[in-house]
Image: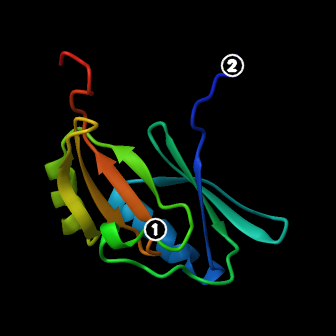
Amino acid sequence: MSISFSLDHIGITFPPADLDATIDWYSRALGFTVDRRFDTYGMTFVFLVRGDVKIELMAVASTRQAPTDNVLSSMDPARLHHFCLAVTDLDAAVSELRDLGADLIGGPMAVAEIGQRVAFVSDNLGNIIELTEPGPRPGSSG
């Protein structure tokens, strides 16, 4: 295949009433800032950025998804399950996020098959965010 891909952004939909609380959560808990906010096609869009990571908030959904308190029991219903952010120090990131009020719903845990440790938090809407720290990949010598 000759097409080259890189991730541009992740989009999250939710009811309009949750917009300000969601901007606040991503700003306070994860350090994102508002890059752009605009209305078009009857919807409000907000792009949040932190470094090379961009999240698109879309205030348009008519219902909220049910939050979970355990990542291992969250595999149903069919939906985007999570997005993953890489961190340098998983334990420090989890500790800081807990101090900021983020709900830890899984881990930290080692996943031997990928040679990494991961943890899961949920945002104010119940969206699942995986955190992973670097580690040796299977088959690597590091």
Residue located at (42% from left, 74% from top): 124
Q: Position of residue 33 (x, y in %)?
A: 48, 53
Q: Alpha carbon of mark 1 to alpha carbon of mark 2: how far?
A: 33 Å
Q: Is residue 53 left or right of residue 30?
A: right
Q: Is residue 101 left or right of residue 48?
A: left
Q: Position of residue 7 (x, y in %)?
A: 57, 37
Residue behind mark 2: 1
Where the N terminus falls, by quadrant? top right
Circle 2 — which element?
Answer: loop
Residue behind mark 1: 127
Q: Report if the CB atoms under discs 1 and 2 are less than 8 Å apart.
A: no
Q: Nearer the viewer, residue 62 or 52?
A: 62
Q: Residue furthest right?
A: 41
Q: Amino acid at mark 2?
A: Met
- Location of residue 101 by image quarter: bottom left
- Location of residue 129 by image quarter: bottom left
How packed mark 1 is, by other alpha carbons closer than 10 Å (few <14, some 14-19, many 20 or more), is: many
